[in-house]
Image (cartoon, grey):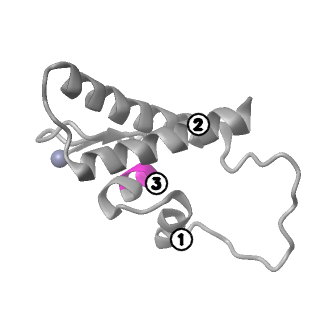
């Protein structure tokens, strides 16, 4: 594992998994969704204010880009595996669909 202590970017030297920050790491290693990962890291604040239902931009642009980079890399790796004849496991396929949904949600949120 290598970590850029200035940016928080990380990469696993064994399997090639990588991400842009500690939240991406928690999502990957903890197998959590974004909000659960943020809560696990203690960086999610629950206030009692009602959710403002304007156009939701759930993430800062910087964090959204980080998640987008992570998920699109995951999708690209899966596509590369399929292109080289590898059959994805059910778990891989399910994770790929999570990536696809996240990418689509980010595109919609920032469109
Ligand atoms: Zn690894």
Q: CA distance from mark 1 to mark 3?
A: 10 Å
The circle drawn on residue 23 is 3
Q: Quadrant of residue 84?
A: top left
Q: Which residues are the magenta region?
A: 21-25
Q: Secondary structure at mark 1?
A: helix
Q: Position of residue 37 (x, y in %)?
A: 47, 64
Q: Is mark 3 within 8 Å of ligand 1?
A: no
Q: Is mark 2 within 8 Å of ligand 1?
A: no
Residue at the image position 22 percent from the left and 26 percent from the top = 82
On screen, residue 25 above or below 44: above
> Which quarter of the rendered picture does the C terminus lie within?
top right
Q: Nearer the viewer, residue 20 or 74?
A: 74
Mark 3 or 2 closer to N-term? 3
Predominant secondary structure, magenta span: helix
Q: Where in the figure is residue 33, as x and y percent of width and height?
A: 48, 60
Q: Residues within 10 Å of mark 1 (few under 14, many from 20)?
A: few
Disc 3 is placed on an element classified as helix
Residue 105, by quadrant, is top right
Q: Secondary structure at mark 2?
A: helix
> The N terminus appears in which quarter of the rendering?
top left
Give the Cα distance between marks 2 and 1. Answer: 23 Å
- Say whether disc 2 or disc 1 marks the residue closer to the N-terminus: 1
How far across and down, in percent of the image, does residue 69 sit? 46, 32
Determine which of the numbered discs, if any, sits on residue 104 in the image: 2
């Amino acid at each position: 594992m290598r970590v850029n202590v200035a940016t928080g970017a990380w990469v696993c030297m064994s399997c090639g998994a990588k991400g842009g920050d500690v939240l991406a790491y928690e999502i990957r290693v903890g197998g959590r969704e974004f909000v659960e990962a943020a809560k696990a890291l203690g960086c999610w604040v629950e206030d009692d204010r009602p959710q403002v239902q304007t156009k939701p931009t759930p993430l800062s642009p910087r964090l959204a880009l980080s998640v987008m980079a992570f998920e699109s890399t995951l999708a690209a790796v899966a596509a590369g595996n399929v292109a080289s004849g590898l059959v994805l496991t059910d778990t891989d396929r399910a994770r790929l669909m999570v990536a696809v949904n996240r990418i689509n949600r980010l595109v919609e949120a920032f469109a």
